[in-house]
Image: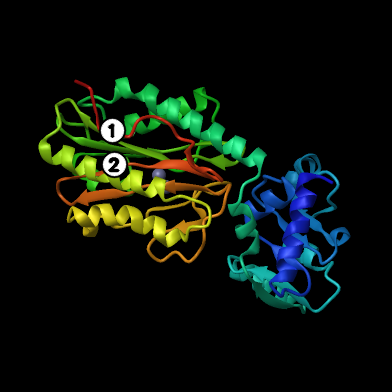
Amino acid sequence: MSESADRRDRARVAFSTSGVRGPVLVTSAANIRYLTGFSGSNAVLLLGTEPDEDLIGTDGRYADQVAEESPGLPAVIDRATVAAVAGHVSGSVLGVETSAPLAVVEGIRALGLQPIAVPDVIEALRAVKDEGELALIERACQVTSLALEALIPEIRPHVTERYLARRLETLFSDGGGEDRAFPTIVASGCNSAIPHHQPDDTRLEPGDLVVIDAGARVRGYHADMTRTFVVGRSPTAEQEDMHAAVEQAHAAGVAACLPGRAAVTIDAAARLVLRERGLEDRFTHGLGHGVGLEIHEAPAVSSRATGTIQANMTITVEPGVYLPGQGGVRIEDTLVVADAGPRALTTGGTGLRVVGL
Ligand code: ZN
Ligand code: ZN
């Protein structure tokens, strides 16, 4: 049985176990890729109650691609994709994902079927990676780590944030990445206090903190990594203290990434370090997230997370401290939770590096 067919069977069992009766229309692109191998931008998958009812639908642009990427899976090629696939449902109800667009739900109703929201069981399956997935994520993380290291000689006063972002993305391509995993963040000076600052024409100034948060993508799998630098001048005592606090929080978070731990306790382990230094209210986001076919996926690792960490999950640990008007520090690694404990897939020391002197 193909890997995709095996995954579909596991999803079928998981839906049945969670009480879903009847077929499910899968519309999430990442879920479809996971269950079929198809990587095109337009598709729906009918996951039948029996394997021989599985059916993928896409449009004419992808007729060849779907045959190549999803061999053995019957396909319908039709511009009215949802209607063409849902037309094969024999019963009266059809499961839909909570992420399904309203237009899909309405389209199902228009066919005389009753849409039923189903739980996120495919996302839960995807959270635990198999060997092939781990190899691709590790490759994406290697490309990312090497590219960031290669960028360091170019991080110097007077270059712009935008220049560094584009250079890093070129280095991803040179290293074998198919694309960036998400829009690269380069945030210097006061901008480094903005967690999701988008790079602009701001020029790096001597003494700036520079936060670079980026990742490469390899065959659909993402990497996510952040390092913070001081450019062109020795760091101030305040910059060193802030960075040391985040580095300790990062280490505490990584050490807590063990199979069987509640995700919320991993966030808490890092947050405690910052609380003891009076910086907890400057850490304004969750500690991390799952990484795989999507840059942000299950499990959430935050103060509100409800899940449990399992072996072979790939997650980020990314504490940060942000002082508005002054600057910020974030350190992030993507790691795999092995049975024996966490193993960082992004590499390179976490210490504060002075660059561009
Ligand atoms: Zn990141
Ligand atoms: Zn992240």
Three-letter code, disc 1: Gly
Give the amino acid at mark 2: Glu
Q: Is residue 280 visible?
A: yes
> Which residue is tagged 1?
351
Residue 155 spot, x, y in % from top left: 28, 26
Q: Is residue 122 left or right of residue 356?
A: right
Which residue does the image show at 74% across and 52% down from the upper left?
A: 7
Residue 268 location, quadrant: bottom left
Tell me the SS state at disc 2: helix
> Is residue 65 shown left or right of residue 294?
right
Q: Earlier in the sequence, mark 2 or mark 1?
A: 2
Instruction: Note whether 171 is above or below 88 in the view shown.
Output: above
Q: Do the residues under discs 2 and 1 have CB atoms within 8 angstroms?
A: yes
- Mark 1 Cα within 10 Å, few/some/many (few <14, many 20+)? some
Between 142 and 33, the one lying in front of the other is: 142
Dot 1 lies on which element?
loop
Q: Residue furthest front?
A: 340
